[in-house]
Amino acid sequence: MWTRALSISFIGFIVWVISAANNGAELMLFKFVAAIPFGDKIGHFLIFLLITICTNIGINAKQVFIYGKHYSLAFLLIGLLATSEEFSQIFIASRSFDWIDLTASLGGVWCGAKLKSAQKQENL
């Protein structure tokens, strides 16, 4: 129960960070990340890694069957979210679209889904 509450809280925090960035807010967190070499890319990777893990926890690692293969529902949902969020930056004056950010985000999603599926197989 507490893991779901923690997961929902973390996702809420990330939504707040994304909203602040979209509105041009200058949070101390953004200054800290900017001071680290490749901090933005590392941030994208870690944020989406953790969101994917949290989502997997929240939905009990639910799988969907598409064209003869099983896929993590969290992988599909958060992958779509990451892609949509990055492309939406094209239309926001204070933001800028970046293929490398998208790659880092999707890398985090993929790793988060793989970590959860590895853990699930270990528990069998």
Image (tube, helix red, strand yellow):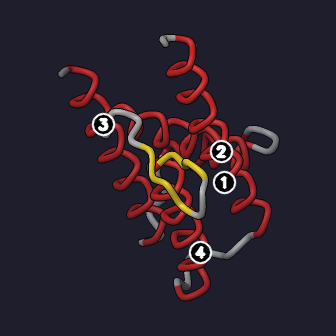
Query: In terms of sequence position, does the residue under pointer 2 or pointer 3 come before the other?
Result: 3
Q: Which residue is mark 3?
A: 58
Dot 2, crowdedness within 10 Å: few (<14), some or many (≥20)? many
Q: Is residue 70 left or right of residue 59?
A: right
Dot 1 falls on a residue whose secondary structure is helix
Dot 2 falls on a residue whose secondary structure is helix
Q: Residue 102 appears at what percent x and percent y?
A: 69, 62
Q: Which residue is mark 1?
A: 106
Dot 4 falls on a residue whose secondary structure is loop
Q: Residue at x 54, y 42 (%)?
A: 47
Q: Residue 32 appears at what percent x and percent y?
A: 61, 39
Q: Which residue is mark 4?
A: 95
Give the residue type at disc 1. Answer: Leu
Per the rendering, the mark at residue 110 is 2
Give the residue type at disc 2. Answer: Trp
For the residue pair 31 and 116, the one nearer the viewer reads as 116
Q: Residue 5 appears at what percent x and percent y?
A: 21, 30
Q: How far apart are labels 4 and 2 at the CA level? A: 24 Å
Look at discs 1 and 3 and give the one toward the viewer: 3
